[in-house]
Image: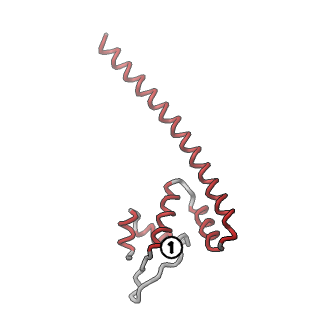
Amino acid sequence: MTISEVSKMLDLSQDTIRYYERIGLIPSIMRKSSGVRDFSEDDCKNINFIKCMRNAGMPIEVLIEYVSLVAQGESTEVARQELIIEQRKILMDKVEEMKQTIERLDYKIEFYGNRALNKKES
């Protein structure tokens, strides 16, 4: 699969995919004899995982560490799990913060809605 196809399929820019490869988040992609990248299904799964983790707010540095641990093999599974658990905790904290923000917004929406209703009745 070409970088253009992967870009469309995963809704990521080609530049982002190249960047991920350059910084080592994606292991070296096989190339055709013409030099064009040839992405495998596993490559696409890895990129999709990276996209998911970035969308969850995982910093690039943590992802690089995670990928490095994966490359070291099964002996790093506990360390990988700890990274994921920590990122999940961070994400859950953000979710709670967002819930509180939504509650404040709902309060304000209701407040202004009531004021507008009271003005119409006056």
Q: Residue at x 63, y 54 (%)?
A: 85
Q: Say which quarter of the image contains residue 15.
A: bottom left
Q: Position of residue 60 (x, y in %)?
A: 56, 62
Which secondary structure, mark 1? Answer: helix
Q: Residue at x 38, y 62 (%)?
A: 11
Q: Residue at x 38, y 19 (%)?
A: 114
In the rendered view, would you say 21 is above or below 12?
A: below
In the rendered view, would you say 4 is above or below 113?
A: below
Relative to the observer, which residue lies in front, 35 or 89?
89
Relative to the observer, which residue lies in front, 32 or 17?
32
- Identified by mark 1, the residue type is Glu
- Quadrant (top left/top right/bottom left/bottom right) for the N terminus: bottom left
Q: Is residue 78 left or right of residue 98?
A: right
Q: Residue at x 40, y 65 (%)?
A: 13
Q: Position of residue 93 (x, y in %)?
A: 59, 44
Total numbered labels: 1
In the rendered view, would you say 95 is above or below 69?
A: above
Query: Disc 1 designates what residue?
Result: 21
Q: Position of residue 99 (x, y in %)?
A: 51, 37
- Quadrant (top left/top right/bottom left/bottom right) for the C terminus: top left
Q: Residue furthest top?
A: 122
Q: Position of residue 59 (x, y in %)?
A: 57, 58
